[in-house]
Image: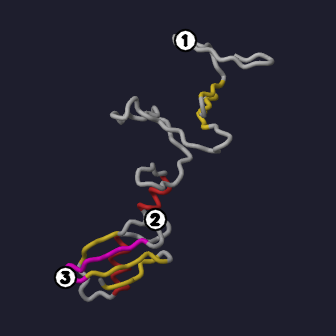
Amino acid sequence: MLDALNVYSYYAPNLQSVGTLTSLQVDDIYVNGNTISYVNGSQGVGSIYLQPKSPETTGTVDVSNARISSLQNPVDLTDAVNKQTLLNTAKTVSLGLSANISGLDDATIAATIINKIYPASALVDEHREGTICRIWGVDTGTAKQFGLVSGAWIFQADL
């Protein structure tokens, strides 16, 4: 409780209702409307933890089918990932295929086999610059590596 000169604290172990609050601060957690934030002037921005009832349970965070937004890029292996990071990673995953390549030069393999299966066109936007495609020559028993460079599959190495 607060008056013009003093702040009073009350202990009420059986309290079940306090009426309508517009905001609430408990320790370093501040609740205002639909915002829960960490406040600690001496330590700056901090973390807010969702913890299950006991260390033995794992619990579930249910966001009632709502979106989670403004998620940073992951740093640790157990961090959540945002959609942009996921798409960028998926579009640069190494590709592989097997084909008959006997008698074909590297440019022909790139244009007639790889580009037909994995189009390099910027209009398709399936793969990003730097993506690697490895092709196994079924009929030759050899492997080749191509990279997506400036919108085209370019031979990089015999493997």
Instruction: Using the numbered discs, state the Cα–Cα distance from disc 1 to disc 2 in whole angstroms.
Output: 62 Å
Magenta extent: 131-142
Mark toward the viewer: 2 or 3: 3
User: At label 2, which amino acid type do we have?
Assistant: Val
Q: Establish if 143 lies above or below 58.
A: below
Tell me if residue 141 is in the magenta stretch: yes
Mark toward the viewer: 1 or 2: 1
The front one of 65 and 8 is: 8
SS state under label 1: loop
Q: Position of residue 113 (x, y in %)?
A: 32, 76
Instruction: Using the numbered discs, state the Cα–Cα distance from disc 2 to disc 3 in whole angstroms.
Output: 30 Å
User: At label 1, which amino acid type do we have?
Assistant: Leu
User: At label 3, which amino acid type do we have?
Assistant: Asp
Q: Which mark is residue 139?
A: 3
Crowding at dot 2, Cα within 10 Å, few <14 / some 14-19 / many 20+, comes out as few
Q: Which mark is residue 15?
A: 1
Residue corresponding to mark 2: 124
- Colouring scheme applied when the structure was drawn: secondary structure
Tell me if residue 37 is in the magenta stretch: no
Q: Establish if 103 lies above or below 69.
A: below
Residue furthest to the right:
4
